[in-house]
Image (cartoon, coloured by chain):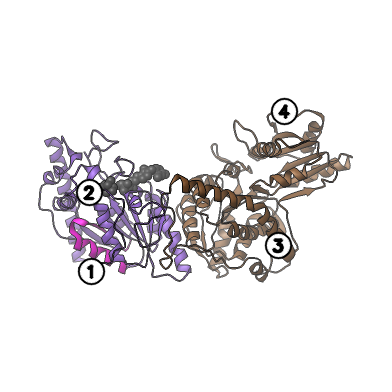
Chain colours: A purple, B brown
Amino acid sequence: MGKMIDILCSGHAACPGCIDAVSARHVLAALGPDCVAVMPPSCMAVIAGPQPFSGLRIPVYQASLESAAASACGLRRALDVRGRTETQVVVLAGDGGTYDIGLQCLSSAAERNENILYVCFDNEGYMNTGAQKSSSTPRYAKTGSTPAGKPTRKKNFTEIMAAHRVPYAATATAGFLRDLVRKVEKAKSLRGTRVLTLLIPCLDGWGVPEDQGIAVARLAVQSGMFPLYEVEDGLRYTLNDPPKSRPVRDYLMSQGRYRNLGDAQLDELQREVDADWARLEQRAQASAVQ
Amino acid sequence: MSPGNDAVLLTGNHAVAWGARLARPKVVPVYPITPQTPILELLTEFQAQGELEAEIITPESEHSVMAACIAASLGGVRVFTATASQGLMLMHELLHYASGARAPIVMANVNRTIASPWGFWPDQTDSVAQRDTGWIQFYVESAQEGLDTVLQAFRIAERVRLPVMINLDAFYVSHSLEPVRVPPQALADEYLPPYAPEHYLDPARGESWGNVVTQEMYWRHRRDIGGAMDAVPEVAAEADREWQRLSGRGWDLVERYRCEGADLVVLTMGSMCGTAREAVDELRDAGHAAGLLKVRLFRPLPAAELRRALAGVRDVLVLDRNFSPGAGGVLHQELRAALYGTAAAPRVHGALAGVGGVNVPPAKIAELAGRARSSEPLPEAVWAR
Ligand SMILES: Cc1ncc(C[n+]2csc(CCOP(=O)(O)OP(=O)(O)O)c2C)c(N)n1
Ligand code: SF4
Ligand SMILES: [Mg+2]
């Protein structure tokens, strides 16, 4: 990677060691300055800074929590009318603003294939309000609203978006930066609704030491809990390196939110991950022979 | 049909759509709801025929419609939309958002009962319930007034940088066919120059909107919105005068109908004004000095003008086609607040007349007027139909 031009400035308000900020820095650098950001309330919106400061060198519209994608569509059309058709409209949203309260308008934007890049900073919970569960929180993770562990699975957001047949839906994480930057660049080169989901280990919310965010992000991928893949036009699945190579136990034990997990629960999560991985491999193979 | 100065038959909805077309909005997000849908349909038809150069957005809900309106407006272009009833309710959070963002959006709202239970009837509770959202509100009585008010609304909105809601009663106005003069495009263009905002979101400018502010900044921002609202009566009066000069039609902010020497004045908004005119005529024929004050601009309430118009009047009968449980009729409340403390204020009588769309014939209004003249006002509004 060459010298990057920072769009996210230093001095922002993220927790020290936060992966949200690192990820945003690289996403924005890859997009460049001809860009307008839309942010619903989330850690990212806090990082963007309080008035009169701005943590970003591009215009930011802070939308309401449930309306990021709809707002992005309005801005997109206004820019088009003014002839700024090459300007990227990028949404930087949390998983709560995406998987939950904002899913309806995102689905609608995707159905219309609006020309926006939607980046979900998936820290698997409502961190801005003190770490409650979202529908992205994985099974058995403890949060402020699921103190005994969440009893149900993490929603499969990328498949939901792929089912809209959007041109591009992919997962990535700052733990594998080259892959992340490549995906941002690829998304930038396409038109229509493009969706990236970035896994963001949240230090405070997950119970991860300040210097371990990247290591945990890597474990998430290596354990198969957060596979790296991309889906083109909703049909062509490609699995990206690295493949699943470690037991989920290694990943789960790195975080406070899975403390006191029993062996039976561990085994159950391992079985889920194995089955999900097998299904993904099947899809990738089926795409390859197409 | 082509625009010109000849009258054509249009419904209130279609007249509003024509007004919007003549204003040349660039982004039009829309969502259907009875009885607003004909506005949406005519606008999308205009656009499909190449007669309206606008980006139409068809999101999944009114909530997203308003979200798109705000962001498009902050993107620096003119924005129009229309809704009714439940749609307006769903937008509520973003109505505040829009005025906070100082987005000069113009929206038509067809006044319809709010569920539950379901109904499709004329009732203004939907929009009067939005009176604290920072939107300027007009209530129109006819199709022609609807068309003209859309054009005036853009002029006002863009001058004071606040959004404007134009309210028309379900069916009585939205679906009644009336002769309407559709002004030529050149006239509309002369009245309403292209939108050229001072601030907008663009990478070349680097301005942002919505970051967290301090108490002090929030306080100042709210005070500024108040200042913009305070300027509205004057700006709206100018907009009306200028429209009168160009088109020959003016509507006033508060219209006085046969108020000369009146000792009793009926005060109401929207389609009820048509019925009240008849009642006033009947009362005058019977030798009673009765008049009508039509409140066309409801937010901000032109309090000074109302006080002037009611000076020397003995009784005011307020007809509210809305109901705020626990408070009564909203216009009744507002008028009493506007008159409080004024010397020799008239006696204010309130009637919840036509709530839920029930018919209120002229004879009923005359009867209520008769009762008002002969009895002390009650603290609460009376239910009437
Ligand atoms: C309509 C509405 N409900 C609730 C809130 C409060 N709220 C602000 S941020 C947030 C959660 C955000 O979670 P997520 O999108 O995952 O972002 P994160 O903070 O985790 O980055 C909530 C519930 C709000 N701003 N608006
Ligand atoms: S709460 Fe978590 S995601 Fe949010 S800024 Fe802190 S570490 Fe980052
Ligand atoms: Mg989150």
Q: Quadrant of residue B239?
A: bottom right
Q: Amino acid at mark 1?
A: Lys
- For the residue carrying disc 1, how many other residues have a C-alpha within 10 Å: few (<14), some (14-19), or many (20+)? few
**Callout 2: chain:** A
Rounded to the nearest angstrom, the CA distance separating label 1 from label 4 is 77 Å
- Which is more toward the observer, A265 or A211? A211
**Callout 4: chain:** B
Looking at the image, residue B243 lies above or below residue B66: below
Rounded to the nearest angstrom, the CA distance separating label 4 from label 2 is 64 Å
Residue that label 3 marks: B243
Residue B262 spot, x, y in % from top left: 84, 42
Looking at the image, can residue A187 be seen? no
Rounded to the nearest angstrom, the CA distance separating label 1 from label 3 is 59 Å
Residue that label 1 marks: A3
The reply, left or right, for residue B232 in relation to residue A249 is right
- For the residue carrying disc 3, how many other residues have a C-alpha within 10 Å: few (<14), some (14-19), or many (20+)? many
SS for dot 2: loop
Closer mark to the observer between disc 1 and disc 3: 1
**Callout 1: chain:** A
Looking at the image, can residue B128 be seen? yes
Q: What mark, if any, has residue A201 been given in the picture?
A: 2
Q: Is residue A272 magenta?
A: no
Residue A203 spot, x, y in % from top left: 22, 46
Residue B300 spot, x, y in % from top left: 63, 47
Q: What mark, if any, has residue B378 been given in the picture?
A: 4
Magenta part of the chain: A166-189
Rounded to the nearest angstrom, the CA distance separating label 3 from label 2 is 60 Å
Residue A21 spot, x, y in % from top left: 27, 54
